[in-house]
Image (cartoon, rainbow, N blue to C red):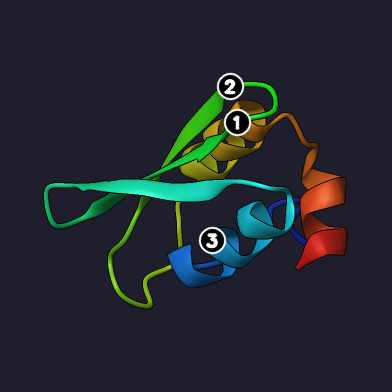
Amino acid sequence: MTSVFPDVNSKQIVKVIEQLGFEFIRQSGSSHAIYYRVSDKRRTTIPVHGNKSLKRKTIRSICKDVDISLEELKKLL
């Protein structure tokens, strides 16, 4: 049985959201990057913890923030 959630780290998520038109705005502390898309004024926060995999709830939250489904995320990876 395969997992619905892809095993991704922050670098992979950043590549995907940059493809979707998000731009890096600022770093919050040393471990969270804030990305923003001007066209629809959406914002998301990506935790940056090296090569650690992101948790399922974090992946779900990022997908909700950028308005994509898990299937779309898998295609963009």
Residue lying furthest left: 29
Q: Can residue 1 be seen in this view?
A: no
- Viewed as shown, does residue 34 lie left or right of 29? right
Residue 23 in the image: above or below residue 67: below
Q: Distance between the residues labelled 1 and 2?
A: 5 Å
Reading the image, the residue beneath label 2 is: 41
* Residue situated in front as seen by the camera: 4 or 19: 19
The tag on residue 14 is 3
Q: Which amino acid does label 1 sit on?
A: Val
Relative image position of residue 4 (x, y in whole percent): 77, 51
Q: What residue type is labelled 2?
A: Lys
Q: CB under 8 Å between callouts 2 and 3?
A: no
Residue lying furthest bottom: 51
Helix, strand or loop at disc 1?
Answer: loop
The tag on residue 38 is 1
- Residue at figure coordinates x 54%, y 32% from the top left: 61
Q: CB under 8 Å between callouts 1 and 2?
A: yes
Residue lying furthest front: 38
